[in-house]
Image (cartoon, rainbow, N blue to C red):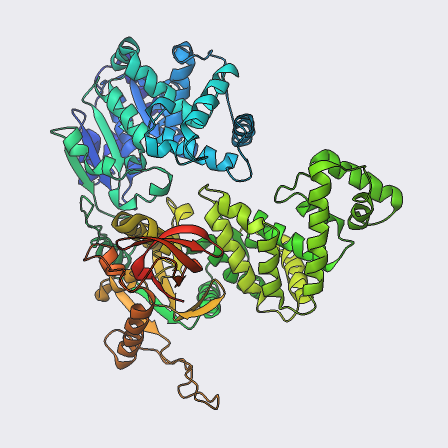
Amino acid sequence: MAETQKISDLARARAPAGPAPYLEGLNPEQREAVEALEGPVLVLAGAGTGKTRVLTTRLAHILNMGQANPWEILCVTFTNKAAREMRHRVGTLIGDAVERLQWLGTFHSISAQILRRHAELVGLKSTFSILDTDDQLRLLKQVITAENIDEKRWTARHLASLIDGWKNRGLGPDKLGAQDGYSFANGKGAKLYGVYQERLKVLNACDFGDLLLHTLNIFLNHDDVLFDYHRRFRYLLVDEYQDTNVAQYLWLRLLARGTSNLCVVGDDDQSIYGWRGAEVDNILRFEKDFPGAKVVRLERNYRSTEHILGAASGLITANKGRLGKTLWTDEAGGEKVAVRGVWDGEAEARAACEEIENWYSKERAYADCAVLVRASWQMRAFEDRFIQLGLPYRVVGGPRFFERAEIRDAHAYLRAVKSGADDLAFERIINVPKRGIGATSVQKLQQLARSMEVPLQEACRHVIATDEIGGKARTGLRMLLSDIDRWRDMANSLPHGELTEIILDESGYSAMWMADKSPLAQGRLDNLKELVQAMGAFDTLDGYLEHVALVSELDTRNETDDQISLMTLHAAKGLEFPLVILPGWEESVFPSQRSLDEGGVEALEEERRLAYVGLTRARQQAIIYFAANRQIYGRWQSVLPSRFVDELPPEHVDAQADTGYYNRDEGGHAEVGFDEARSTYNSPGWARFQANKNTVRNKTIEGSAQRLGADKQSSNGLKKGMRIFHQKFGYGRITQIDGDKLSVSFDKAGAKKVMAGFVEKA
C-alpha cells in the first residue's frame, strides 16, 4: 500500500522516482520493452508471452519515472474488456492515479470523447446520439425505400455492411471510387451513402463507424485541433496493433506526429480479422513508417509446452508475410501435438469426446477442455454427442446450434407443414422472408382465430377469401398457404431431408440469406446445409423433431459451471485451455474454400495464422482431427487432410490415422474392412493414407497450387454455356470466361466467380 501511494504521489508531481520493484519480475525482453521510453517502439509479443503485463508495467513506469502525467498518456485497446483489465492492473501499481488516465480506452470510446468536444466541426451537436445496429438498419431501410429501390433485393443489412467497410477504410461518400459505388443497387451505393450521412446529421446522430471517421476528418481538416492533441499527449500506447484497420491506422499516424514516443504491441502471427477490415501490413511496415524504431521480440512463452510451441512455430514459418520470431519455453517436453485421422465427422466427435472423458476421469475438469472449430456448422455433431453422453458444455460467442435463428426458422417451417395447429411455428414464419404481412395484419389474424376458436392457419384460409386482409398481405398469405399444402403432400413421398431443402428454396428463405451480403450470411447458409445433413440420421421427420425438442429440454437441465467450451477459432483468441481439440483440419474446411476462392495467397496466410492461434490456445495438450470422408452439401466426398497438417514439424507431432477403408466388391462384401489400425509418420499405414490423400488431392483441388502462386490453371476445354460442377457451389452454367476465371450462374448459389481449376464438366 505504501508503494502504491508513493508511485501515485510521484505521478502527480512528474518527479523521478526511486527504485522500481515492479520491474523485478520481468524477463530481460519484457524489461527492455518497458524501459524503452524514448522514440518509437514495436513490441512483437508472441502468444502467451505476457504482453498485457508489459503494457501495464510500461504505463506505470512512465508515471513512476515522472515522464508524463496520467492525462498526458493515450492508451488504446480494442475491446472494453481489455481496457477494464488494463485499468485494473495499472491501478494495482499506481493507485489513485489510474483515475486520471482519462485517455485509456478503445479506439471508439476515445474517438467519442474527442468528437463530443468538436462535434460542430462535422455538423453535429455535442449531444449527438450513437445508433445501435437496429436503429441503423431501420434508417437505411427508409433511405433505400425513398429512392424507390427494391429492399428485398438490395437489403439494408447489405448496405450497412458496405458502409461499415467504407468507413473502416476512412472513406466518406465523396471519396468512394467508381467500383465501390457500383457495388450496391446498380451504381447507387455512393448516393445512398451520402443520403444516409445527411439523415444522420439531421437526427444529430452517428453510427459506430462515424466515431472514428468524423474524428479522422476533424484531424485532417482542422490543424489547430490536431495540434492541440499533439501538445496534450506525450506518450501513445497501442494494444493489438496487428488488428488495426485503415481508418485506425490513419488516426494513429496523425496523432503520432506530435511525439516520437509511440509504443505499439502486437503479433503479426495472430492477425486473423482481415474479413472485418484489419490490415496486417500496418504492423509489418511499422519500421518503415517510424524510422529508427526499436523492435523488441517477446518470445518466451509462459503458457504452452515445448512440443505445442514447436508445432505452432513450425507451422507459421510457411507464411511469407511476417516479421519473424520463434516462441520458446522453460517447460521442456510435454505431450506432442496429437494428429488423428478418422473416418468421418461423426467418428471425429466420438473420438474427441472419448479424449474429454479420459481427461475428466483423471480428476480434471471439463472446464479445462475446449473444442475450437473453423466454422459454426461444425458444432452440430459435437453438440449432439455431448448431449448423448450427458457432457456439460457451453457455446462461447454465440447460441447453440439448435438455438440459432436460421435453424429455428427452418424448424418452424417443418412444424407448420407437419401440423396445421402449430400456431407458434406459423407465426414465426408467416412473414419470413418478407411477404407483406405486417404486424397489424398478423394481429387481426390472431384475433380472428381466437374468435373462431380455430388454429391460425385455418383462420387464414377463411380470411383470404374476404376483404379483411387486402393488398400484398392477402397475396403473400395465399401463396404461403398454397406452398404449405403442396409441401404437406410432398411429405408423404419425399425423404425429410430433401423436403427441407425444397421448403427452404421454394419459400425464398435460402434466397433471403444469399441476397444478404453481411459477413454472417454465409455462415447461416452453411448452418442450414448442416441441418439438412443432420436430418439424414433420422428415419422420419417426427423422429427428428422429437430429437430437437429433447435436445432443447436436456440443454436447460445440464447447466453447471464446469463445462466444456465449444467455440470458433476466432472467438478463442485471447483465451487458453489445458486441453484444446481442433477438428476439421481438411482442405475446403480449414483452410476454408471460400477464403481460398476469394482471397488467394493473403487469405491462405490468414487461415494459417488462425491455425497458429488455435494451437497456441493449448497449455498442456492439443489434438488435431481430420476426416477421410465428409458430407459436403449433401454429398459424401473423400477429403484430404489440410495442408496445415503437412506443415507441422514431425518431431513435435504424434500422428496416427485409421487406415482401413470400405471398398466393396460387386457382391457388397468389404474387400478392406474399416479397422482401428493405427500408424505413425513414415510407417506403411501412414504412407498408404498419404497415397490415398494424394489421389483425392488430384480429384478435388486440382489447380489450387497454380491458383495460389504458380502458373495459372488453363480453362481449356471449358466453354461459355457449358454445365459444370463446383465442390462448394454445386451445379451451374458458365456465363463468361476470362482467362482462368469463370463467371458461373449456379443453380442454388447464384452468380459467382470461380477458378477454372475448381470446376469439372457436369
- Please determine whether, in this image, residue 138 is positioned above or below residue 232: below
Towards the viewer: 145 or 572: 145
Residue 574: x and y in percent read 37, 44
Q: Is residue 270 above or below residue 682?
A: above
Residue occupying image coordinates x 63% and y 71%: 539
Give the residue drawn at x 85%, y 43%: 450
In this picture, residue 628 sits left or right of residue 353: left
The furthest residue to the bottom = 667
Q: Is residue 332 visible?
A: no
Q: Residue furthest left?
A: 292
Q: Is residue 702 above or below residue 45?
A: below
Q: Nearer the viewer, residue 301 or 687?
A: 687
**Nearer the observer, 355 or 334:** 355
Relative to 208, say whether 594 is above or below. Answer: below
Quadrant in the picture for residue 80? top left
Task: Using the image as rendered, state which of residue 504 and residue 305 is in the foreground.
Answer: 504
